[in-house]
Structure formats: structure tokens, C-alpha cells
Image: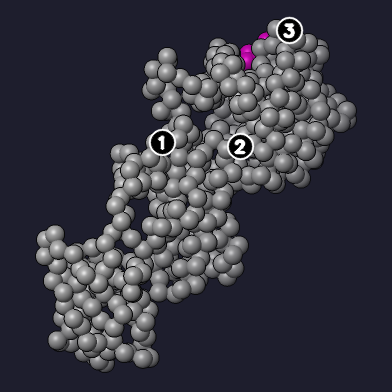
Amino acid sequence: MRYQFEEFALDTDRRELQRGSDVVSIAPQVFDLLEHLIRNRERVVSKDDLIKAVWNGRIVSEAALTTRLNAVRAAIGDSGEAQRLIKTLPRKGFRFVGPVRELPMSAGAAITDRPAEPPRPAALTLPDRPSIAVLPFTSLSSDPEQDYFADGVVEDITTALSRFRWLFVIARNSSFSYKGRPVDVKQVGRELGVRYVLQGSVRKGGHRMRIAGQLIDADTGVHLWADHFEGPIEDMFDLQDNLASSVVGAIAPKLQREAIKRARRKPTESLDAYDHYLRGLTKARWSDNAANSEALRLFTKAIELDRSLACAYGMAAWCYVRRKANGWIDDHARERAEATRLARKAVDLGADDPAALYVGAYALAFIAEEFDDAAAFIDRALAINPNFAQAWGTSAWLRVWRGEPDLVFEHAAHAMRLNPLDPSTQHEAHGAMAYAHFLAGRHDAAASCAENALRDHPAYLLSLCVFAAGSALAGRLGPARGAVLQARQCNPNLRAATLRELTPFRRTEDFATFANALRDAGLPE
């Protein structure tokens, strides 16, 4: 059925409210409430009747009903004061009083006053990168300010995701063509040529704003992730920024993990450069020498297939960082030179690629001890993509070696906020903060923070060392010596003479304090 009143039309088959040729965006319950009032316009509809019809008899507060009724009125240009179309009868209920014309919709019939739908475009070929469209979020409020807020959040999320060079993100104008329309996620995926779709809603509750989002595989319709974020409404623009960065921080790692899973399912003979890079990322997350060597082989193969793939150069350099940090290096001079070459290639080719910049920068600091260049490159990465949790965490470690404990805390905390559910982000951040406490002379806090890092990664060599150093300077030699024994089990070559390989402090006094504390804890010369 199609109901026409004033310049509006309510299409119950399509579940659409139109004003002229435009679709008005309304929540499903708002649509149901309006439809029920129009269907029963010959009588007064009680509150109980509305609750039974729209909420299936569930207990609903007076405020919730009033909010939905206000949303109905706002959608059709009415108000509680004017009551031009929907009249409130005190202690009795509500009635739709506007003149309505009914147009039955027979199967296959077209309405002459509605333009025909354009033919659906052919399905687009999926890009060779993970691809996503961020659809307009639904505002669950009649307040037009919140509708603008919802659109602003979506624009911020779209912009933030587009800063990840390994992602293919549909532009805002294409995504917003679905605003106010009921969507089939699989159809959206075909029409926009994307593998993933992000949907969401925005709701005001009291003095807080809440945003809910869900990430969907457009090919299968499977929900991959769902969460909600909220904050005080006092400053909507700051809240908009914070919510957008929270959503991006949560879904970007999830998208990359899904891409890695797909690459791992491909037959070996069909792998291209980016597939080799993704498979290398999987191996690079493991903590043993064999996996690290395999990761280096995969990144090297990716470079052979695509000499311009900056992120592969960066991750190849990162493999040498892991080799140095864990005492796996065989030829120090040769490997240092190769790591420095790869890192330089990463930051040169990837001048606008945050993924290449942050790993290349850290390799330059940790291996070549080019601290100033490293800081400049990693700052550029964070300026390009301020929502990159891994880059913030790596930046925290760079500030450790530069002797800047205040920045360590700031950057590590930001990494954890952007990626709160990833154990690797958490243990890396706690490890960096342990060193920051140590540099600031808070030895008890350093040992405590290192313990937090070791819970998720008991064999993390850097955390074992700072736990031992902090405990020794705090007068707890027993735990300190136990940690040194564990550290030497992880790296039998670890001793005072080789400690510089593990901890490239820029300031000689920082290294001297650290090394002497580990000597007290039993580290041999």
C-alpha cells in the first residue's frame, strides 16, 4: 500500500517515506508508528495500542514513546505544538488527522508519479586489496543536529580508513547514495565492488552519545565485528573525532587479519606481491627465529615481484630488527648494512605510506641509531594517519631510545586506546612504559609495568631486562636475578658486552644506569 498526504508518500511495501522524489531517513520503529497511525486514522489510537503494535507489547517507558512520536512528527514536518497531521488527545491517545489518499500496489504495477528505479549496475571486480564502504549511519533521534553528527562520524571514519594505504576505501559520495534507503549488504558489495561494509547507528541517551557499528563481509553477509562506543555530549565535535578514531582503531586490525586469512587460503602458484606481503605479516608476528626467517623470505619475494612495494621493504627491515633484538644475528656488519638499506628504501618509496614509514623509521633508530631521521619519519607517519595504533606503539619505543619518557607514556597510551583488545599492542605498550618509568627513576613502577607486559608475552626479552634492572635498583635482587636467568635462556649470548645490541639508548648515562643495574642482577660481562 502507498499512502499519500501533503507532499509525502508512505510506501509500506518498500518501507520508505518519501518527500517528493527524496527518501526521508527514519528509524524502523518510527516508520511502524507512522504506518499504524495512518492505517487507523479513523479512530483515536491509545498508547497501549501503539505499544502493542510497534513494540509487540514489551514494556516501554513514556519517554521512549514520546521520543518516537516526536521523531514521526519531525519526519513529516509536524510538531507537538502545531499538531497539523498528528493530534494528541489528552488521556486518550493520538490520531492522524491529515487527508490521506490510498494507492494500492498490485504485483508488477508501477506508480506513475514515482520515477522508475534506474537499472542496477553490473557487479564490479574486487580490488586486489581489502576493500570497504562505510554506509551512512542511522540517527536514532528526531534531532537534526544528531543527524549531522552521524554524517560527520561517517565522513571522519571514511577519511581515517583511507589513510591506510593497504585499504581500498569507497569515497563518501558513493557511500552516501545509500542514505535513507533500505540496503542489502550483498547488493552494496556488488554495486560498489567492495568486500566489506561498515554500518552503524548513533543514539543520544541523557547527556551521552552512543555510536554502534558492525563490520560485515559483503560476500557472505557474515558479521565479522560489532561494538559500541560512547562519550559525553558536551562537545559534540571532540566526541565525533574520538568516536571515529575508536571505530577505526578497532576495525583496521580486524580488516588486515581477514585479508591475511584470505591470502593464506590462496594456492601458492597464484600469489602476487601483496599476497606474499600478507603471508609475511603472519609469520612476522611469531616469536621464533624460524618464523622470522620465513617472514623475511616472503617479504623479499614480495619485493622481487613489485619493486615499488614500500611496506614490504619496511617489514623486511623489521625482520632484521627482530634478529638483532633476539640475538639471532650471524654477521653484524652485513646485516646492519642490509637492514639500513631496506629501511631507507621503505621511507623513500613510502613517503606517503604510514605502514612503510613507521617500520622503516624504527629500523633506522634501532639498527643504524639514526635517531633524528627516525623521529622525523615516524612523526610523518602519524601525521598522515593519526589512527594507526601500531605506529603509535612503535613511536613509544623510539622515544625510549631517545630518552623522552613523557612522550613514551603519551604515545603508548594512545596505542592502547586505539587498539584495546590486541594483546601484542598491550604488551608492547606496557614494555615501553616500563622503560619510561626506569628512565624517570621510578624503579618499582618500572618492574610493575614490565610484569604487565610479561603476562601476555613471558619470553619478551626487553621486558625481562627492564624488570630485572628495575627490581635490582629497587633492592629486590632475588626476582632480578631470576629475570636475568630467564633472559639468558631466551638469548644465551646476552651479556654486558652485548647489551648495546639490545638497548640502543641515545644518552650514555641511560645506558650506563641500565647496564650497571643488570650487572647487579647477575648479568655477566
Rendered image quadrant of residue 485: top right
Up the image or down, 271 lies above or below 68; here it is above
Measuring 44% from the left and 62% from the top, which residue is drawn there? 202
Quadrant where the C terminus lies?
Answer: top right
Of the numbered discs 1 and 3, the one sitting upstream in the chain is: 1
Q: Is residue 478 magenta?
A: no
In the rendered image, residue 46, in percent from the top left (x then y), is placed at 19, 83
Kind of element beneath mark 2: helix
Q: Nearer the viewer, mark 2 or mark 1?
A: 1
Rendered image quadrant of residue 295: top right
Q: Which residue does the numbered mark 2 point to in the structure image?
A: 390
Q: Which residue does the numbered mark 1 point to in the structure image?
A: 126
Q: Amino acid at mark 1?
A: Leu
Q: Nearer the viewer, residue 371 or 20?
A: 20
Quadrant where the N terminus lies?
Answer: bottom left
Q: Which residue does the numbered mark 3 point to in the structure image?
A: 331
In the rendered image, residue 235, in percent from the top left (x then y), is placed at 59, 68
Magenta span of residues: 487-493
Label 2 to label 1: alpha-carbon separation? 27 Å
Q: Are marks 1 and 3 in contact (CB under 8 Å)?
A: no
In the rendered image, residue 38, in percent from the top left (x then y), is placed at 20, 79
Up the image or down, 416 lies above or below 483; here it is below
Kind of element beneath mark 1: loop
Q: Nearer the viewer, mark 1 or mark 3?
A: 1
Label 1 to label 3: alpha-carbon separation? 44 Å
Q: Would you say 495 lies left or right of 77 here?
A: right
In the rendered image, residue 74, in percent from the top left (x then y), is placed at 37, 79
- Label ID, residue 207: none
